[in-house]
Amino acid sequence: MTDDSDFSRVAQYIEDEIGFATSHYNDSYLKRRLSSRMRRTDTADYGEYYELLVDNPEEAQELLDALSINVTGFFRNPDVWEGIRSVLRTLSSEQNRVHVWSAACADGREPYSLSMLILDDPRIDESKFRVYGTDINEEALATAQEGVYHSTRTIDIEEQLGFLSNFHAYIDRDDNRFEVTDRVKRLVTFARHDLINDGPKSGFDLVVCRNLFIYIDNEYKRPILRTIAQSIRPEGYLVIGKAETIPPQLKSAFDVLDGRLRIYQRE
Ligand SMILES: C[S@@+](CC[C@H](N)C(=O)[O-])C[C@H]1O[C@@H](n2cnc3c(N)ncnc32)[C@H](O)[C@@H]1O
């Protein structure tokens, strides 16, 4: 078999047997993640890796974790968070109840950033807000529920939290260990949700869905964004990742509020 048809066979197996919708993700992304597992398992090509995968349920789990990569951070792209702050202030002044959804929230640092900002800004009334955090990855969600993060050689949690003038009001710190306080946790609810296979939600005032589309095959960005658009009430807000764009067919559903920061408002 050629390398390409072996790759397709692996991708099909992952989709059918492991339940991860490979056809929605772009090939270069899938190949990068597969190569990383193949290096780890010392398999020479997709054919050999396929055999390993079929024979080892443990490898299926490892692969699933590798596929749903969850790079994230507190206040990722701080300039965008100034834009989010102004949306939150507007919502706080206009409504009695505000529902915010961090879709594809990874290990929870994005919804906790929302919660801390809501608590920190004097022009935002925290009593009006609820934040929902969802992701496809159960392990990431377990970390999110726990709310404990560590600085490492490559991850500087203190620097990430530098967006706030005083993060100590929201985080219990013990050397390299940072735990989100109960007050911050209380605003946030986590649940598993697959943006490809699960249906839309409804009535959200603001949806933040960042840095997922960069991995998604062009053809499938549209249905995911449609699911998200249906989840936002008329005139509600959407924030996508700084390197991401709204597919042309859905542009008419949104007004551009800040093109550089990728902040949109539903028609
Ligand atoms: C790079 S992280 C982005 C996290 C966060 N939004 C941010 O920008 O920092 C991408 C997340 O998308 C999640 N993901 C991938 N496919 C998904 C799907 N079909 N439905 C929901 N989440 C998904 C992954 O598990 C991962 O946690």
Image: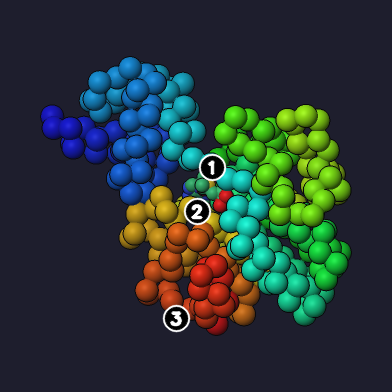
* Image position of 29 (left or right of 200): left
Depth order, front residue of 44/19: 44
Q: Which mark is residue 252?
A: 3
Q: Are marks 1 and 2 in contact (CB under 8 Å)?
A: yes
Q: Residues within 10 Å of mark 3 (few under 14, many from 20)?
A: few
- Tell me the residue at 55%/67% (across/down): 261
**Residue holding disc 2:** 211
Label 2 vs label 3: CA separation?
Answer: 22 Å
- x, y percent for residue 232: 60, 70
| Percent of width and height locating residue 177 | 75, 31
Question: Which numbered disc covers residue 71?
Answer: 1
Amino acid found under the numbered disc labelled 2 = Asn
**Which quadrant of the structure image shows residue 85?**
bottom right
Q: Which image quarter holds the C terminus?
A: bottom right
Left or right of 189? Residue 238 is left
Pick whichever of labels 2 and 3 is earlier in the sequence: 2
Q: CA–CA distance between discs 1 and 3?
A: 31 Å
Task: Specify the amino acid type for callout 3.
Answer: Ser
